[in-house]
Structures are given as structure tokens and as C-alpha cells.
């Protein structure tokens, strides 16, 4: 991160991920899917796949017992600092919002090079203030943008 990012216009924190309570049925379904995948890996003599399934289960259980850490974001004159990583405005192609409070309050940023976008929870930040600041530096994508695939998938499987 450069030492001089200019004046910081906005600064807030958000949890790394949203901790979603899972129902008993979710756990039963996860166990059935896991056992099915393990049986499949044994029948096909694919032990590497079995190890991958077990590692995935281990990571899910570990994440369940771990509290999400707080991620810091700063919108400054020279770019955006997200969790210590600096993104100059030249690397950002556009931004847009998915704003339907109280459930969804997200800012999306799209990178030039990788055509990737990532979401940033707005928490209690006014999206109009964010829009005013970012419009000075990068283009807003006003076309309707549904939720990014990874955000939608996370909601479906309740991760």
C-alpha cells in the first residue's frame, strides 16, 4: 500500500463474511451429500477426491466455530484500500450498487484487467455519499446488475 493515498473520504469496517445460522435440515442435507460423495469416491477408486471432500468439510466446520474478522475499507483520493490492499482508480473499471435494505446493501467494484468484480457490504454507509465520491474517479455501471455469482451461490447454500 502506498504511503500517501491522499485524503480519506470514507472509512468503514464490515465483517469478512456474514455468519448465517443453519437449520437442522441443512446439516442433514450436508451429511447426506458428504456421505454420497465419499461413497462415490470409494467406488470410483478416487481417493484424492475423498481427501478433498474431507478437507472441505473440515474447513466448513472450522469456519462455523470461527468469528468473522473485521475488514477495513478506505475510499481515498488515489484509490481504494480494501483490507490493506490498494486498488488505484486506474485499475478499477466501474462500480454499481445492489441496494435493497435491510437485506442487501452492497457496493460492487469491477477491475479492468481480470474482469472480476467483488462486493463490499455498505453497512450503515449512505450509498449516495459513496456514489458522489466514486463518480469523481470511476464510471458507474447504471445497467441492472444482479448479484455476483458467488454472492448468489452463498445465499442458496447458506454459507
Image (cartoon, helix red, strand yellow):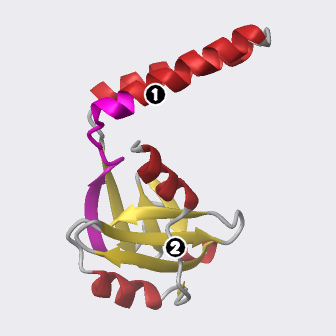
Magenta-drawn stretch contains 51: no
Check the picture and name the quadrant holding the C terminus.
top left
Q: Where residue 77 sits in the image (x, y, percent)?
A: 42, 79
Q: Where residue 23 sits in the image (x, y, percent)?
A: 28, 35
Which is more toward the observer, 46 or 8? 46
Residue at 35 percent across and 66 percent down: it is 74
Q: Earlier in the sequence, mark 1 or mark 2?
A: 1
Q: Where residue 19 sits in the image (x, y, percent)?
A: 29, 43
Q: How many marks?
A: 2
Q: Which numbered marker is on residue 30? A: 1
Magenta-drawn stretch contains 12: yes
Which is more toward the observer, 123 or 47? 47
Point out the stretch of residues depicted in magenta.
8-27
Residue at 47 percent across and 70 percent down: it is 108
Residue at 42 percent across and 58 percent down: it is 82
**Pointer 2 residue:** 146
Residue at 42 percent across and 78 percent down: it is 97
Give left or right: position of 84 versus 23.
right
Amino acid at each position: 500500500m502506498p504511503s500517501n493515498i491522499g485524503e480519506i473520504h470514507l472509512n468503514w469496517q464490515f465483517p469478512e463474511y456474514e455468519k448465517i445460522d443453519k437449520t437442522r435440515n441443512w446439516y442433514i442435507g450436508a451429511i447426506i451429500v458428504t456421505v454420497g460423495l465419499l461413497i462415490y469416491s470409494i467406488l470410483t477408486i478416487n481417493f484424492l477426491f475423498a481427501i478433498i471432500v474431507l478437507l472441505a468439510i473440515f474447513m466448513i466446520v472450522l469456519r462455523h466455530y470461527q468469528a468473522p474478522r473485521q475488514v477495513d475499507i478506505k475510499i481515498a483520493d488515489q484509490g481504494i484500500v480494501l483490507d490493506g490492499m490498494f486498488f488505484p482508480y486506474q485499475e478499477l473499471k466501474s462500480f454499481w450498487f445492489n441496494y435493497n435494505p435491510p437485506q442487501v446493501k452492497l457496493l460492487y467494484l469491477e477491475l479492468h484487467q481480470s474482469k472480476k468484480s467483488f462486493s463490499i457490504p455498505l453497512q450503515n454507509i449512505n450509498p449516495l455519499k459513496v456514489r458522489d465520491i466514486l463518480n469523481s474517479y470511476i464510471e458507474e455501471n447504471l445497467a441492472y446488475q444482479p448479484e455476483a455469482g458467488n454472492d448468489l451461490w452463498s445465499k442458496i447454500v447458506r454459507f
